[in-house]
Image (spheres, rainbow, N blue to C red):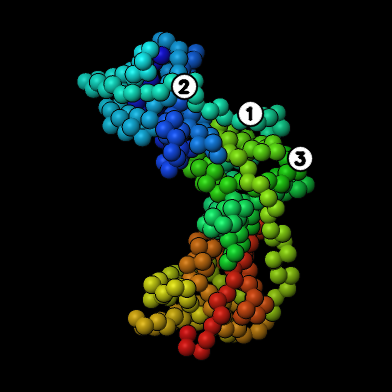
Amino acid sequence: MKIICNQRILANKIGISQKAINSKTTLDLLKGILLSAKGDQLKLTGYDLEIGIETYTQAEVIEEGEIVVNARLFGDIIRKLPDSFVEIETDSENNVYINCVNSRFKIKGDSAKEFPKLPEVNKEDLYNIPQDLLKNMIKQTVFAISQDQTKPILMGELLEIVNGNISLVAIDGYRLAVRSCNLENISNDAKVIIPGKALIDVNSLLSSEEDIKMGFDDKNAIFIINDTKIITRLLEGEFIDYKRLLPREHNTRVKLKTRDLLNSIERASLLSQAEKNNLIKLSIRDNAMAITSNTDKGNVYEEVSLELEGDYLDIAFNSRYFLEGLKNIDSEEIFIEFTTNVNPCIIKPADEIEYTYLLLPVRISSSI
């Protein structure tokens, strides 16, 4: 193999393919990127047997071929080279020669014959979704996936398409985030569970206003973003029936300015950050919500104006979980709905955006 390509573009493509490489793997081959030169393109592939990423770049292909190179070493070398053209050549003993301006490297590669092939996913029945919409949907939900490896199904998100309505759902046992949107060009229904890591990788590549192509089979999901393809294994199992968790009625409903509440809770949580539950207490009265926190370090009082419908209420929450929900709401105002101080609350935008964040409270004592 012998090719010439742009250093800056190549460094970017290496960064993309590296997202699929698990540094903890014990298989040296899976720590590598597969370079495949054919026609006028260089294809870079990273694959850890769970998620695979293929991305392409234009190249002057003098001699076609393929080689596996250590992703970390190869990436570090290319990123440190001058912003110029890079010549990459291999020999029959899998040595890789990298030349750029006055820099010369020789590193050891591996034969591509043993590199695993990515699963084939049917590309005929693909959904088209605007990139900016999917990026927002992932951002507003992926933070709520579980980190508990004993509950692997909750380490992914439910992607559900019913009658043209697409929803992403994440649950970790303490909170639930649901973002939905209706798309007129979607006709086929679907229900799959996508690993959270894959969605984070997809999200990091979304940038333009163009559509992303997305599809599924029984075992895998595929995302095609411009000249990059991501294939991930779906999680197997039954996702929680999240709709049963959503309260159907409330006794207290408040309307607040999102930024005012966010800033107040951030200040109130300064004293509780070292505490186990990051506890803050909300006291809802006629025209204001009092936010307090009492710890060994001191106490804090904040007050936010609100519009109240229903009963007064005293309730406590983990401030970090509360803030993570608020930070992912772009609307100027929000509604918060409560049933009792031991039942979950619902936070949602006051505008028409279909977003719901459910959060369990923390039981409180009079000392808080």
Q: Residue at the front extreme?
A: 26
The residue pinned by badge 3 equals 188
The CA distance from mark 3 to mark 1 is 20 Å
x 71%, y 32%: residue: 125
x 54%, y 36%: residue: 49
Mark 1 or 2, nearer chain start:
2
Name the spot of residue 170 as percent of width and height, x first.
Answer: 61, 56
x 35%, y 29%: residue: 74
**Residue type marked 1:** Glu
What SS does tag 2 mark? helix
Q: Are marks 3 and 2 in contact (CB under 8 Å)?
A: no
The answer to whether one can see residue 57 in this image is no
Does residue 300 sit above or below 357 in this rendering?
below
The answer to whether one can see residue 53 in this image is yes
What SS does tag 3 mark? loop
In front of the other: 331 or 51: 51
177 horizontally vs 16: left or right: right
Name the spot of residue 354 as percent of width and height, x first.
Answer: 66, 57
x 37%, y 23%: residue: 109
Mark 3 or 1, nearer chain start:
1
Mark 1, Cα crowd under 10 Å, few <14 / some 14-19 / many 20+, is few
Dot in front, 3 or 2:
2
The residue pinned by badge 2 equals 112
The residue pinned by badge 1 equals 120
**Residue type marked 3:** Asn
Mark 3 or 2, nearer chain start:
2
